[in-house]
Amino acid sequence: MKRSTLVRGRLVAGLAAVAMLAACGDGAIASGGDGDGESESVGDEDTAEISLRYAFFAPAASFPAVQMEEWAERLNERTDGQISVELFPGGTLLGAGDIYDGVSGGIADVGLDSPAYDVGRFPLSSVVSLPVGFANAKVASRTLLDLLDEFEPQEFAGYEIITAFTTEPARLQSDRPVSSRDDLAGLEVRGSGAGVPALQALGASPVGMPMPEVAEGLQTGVINGYVSSREVLQDFGLAEQVGYVSDYAFGVSNTFVAVMDEDKFAALPDDVKAEIQGLRQEMMEFASGYHDDENVGGALEWAEAEHDLEVVQLDEGEEEAWDEILSELITAWADDVEGNGFDPQEVFNRMTELQEQYTAEFGD
């Protein structure tokens, strides 16, 4: 990959790594009763009906929530109804940033949250948010799950990873065409996470703003655009406010990892554990495929047909210039995550190897 080759040499070799401890609390899985109002402990009977509470912060119509519903249905079918899953999307049980601790504390049995919201807590996972030019969610999601499998990062110590996936890379979506740094200079652009330093480096003026407030921000002229994955054009109705998408891929817009407390998972019957583990890769493939092909693809078709959305190509030489500028963010990432129990150089190199492998198979 051109962009990966550009930035690989910028990482500092031989970064020191130290172990990082992670702690989690205890809790109890809700299990089905025998009709007398008393719950059975998980593991007492391999055939006991078990109910799992699954928490997520975004609305039920969002693609990660579609994934959790699909997971619940498949698990129920494959356990012949032994496992039922009660879904709590939209922050009805736990909000963004609180879900992993809520799983450790027993508030939820399964939790889906975004490590990208807390890079300091999830340093290894944050590598896929770097601006390395992932082709789509299929490539980035496979890369993320493989990295979690291979490196078993301490940031998820105490948890069983149920599945992991990403959005597509974020793109600039604006109320005017942007094809160069001159066009971007001084524009007020909503950004979050890794998008903020990227916008600053390219000369824009980043604005912090919750995604549900972006439409109003565009209407009132507080912002001229935002950096996000493109399904928001339809999901949030933003194609009515922006007419242009600059065809330059920043880092993935968001990452998602679903977990159970490892002790709770261990208490499940062996056949149930096997079914859950069997769904791990399967649900990554479902979520990333749904996001790329239906969620994003459908939003782009709708925005182009209903609102004349225009895709803007960068001017000659601009893509290379943006790559060069943003490569500094990768060097900064390596410095920031040093001393977290892994070698940033090794993780970054492995990520780019996986990226190249999966781009050949699943890149557009």
Image (cartoon, helix red, strand yellow):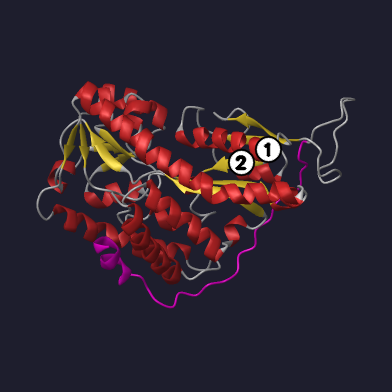
Q: Secondary structure at mark 1?
A: loop
Query: Does the magenta-highlighted stretch encompass residue 38?
Result: no
Pick whichever, 48 or 234, lies toward us: 48
Q: Give the answer, above or below, for where 232 lies relative to 133.
A: above
Magenta residue span: 1-30
- Mark 2, Cα crowd under 10 Å, few <14 / some 14-19 / many 20+, is many
Residue in view at x 23 percent, y 21 percent: 306
- Mark 1, Cα crowd under 10 Å, few <14 / some 14-19 / many 20+, is many
- Marks 2 and 1: CB-CB under 8 Å? yes
Amino acid type of disc 2? Gly
Magenta: predominant secondary structure element?
Answer: loop
Residue 21 placed where, x, y %? 65, 62
- Identify the image quadrant of residue 360: bottom left
Q: Give the answer, above or below, for where 11 lies relative to 45.
A: below
Q: Which mark is residue 111?
A: 2
Residue named by callout 1: 108
- Identify the image quadrant of residue 50: top right
Pick whichever, 90 or 336, lies toward us: 90
Amino acid type of disc 1? Ala
Query: Does the magenta-highlighted stretch encompass residue 11?
Result: yes
Res 126 visible: no
Residue 90 placed where, x, y %? 54, 28
Q: Which mark is residue 305?
A: none
Residue 134 placed where, x, y %? 33, 53
Q: CA distance from mark 2 to mark 1?
A: 6 Å
Pick whichever, 300 or 176, lies toward us: 300
Pick whichever, 49 or 124, lies toward us: 49
In this view, which residue lies farthest toward the right? 36
Q: Secondary structure at mark 2?
A: strand
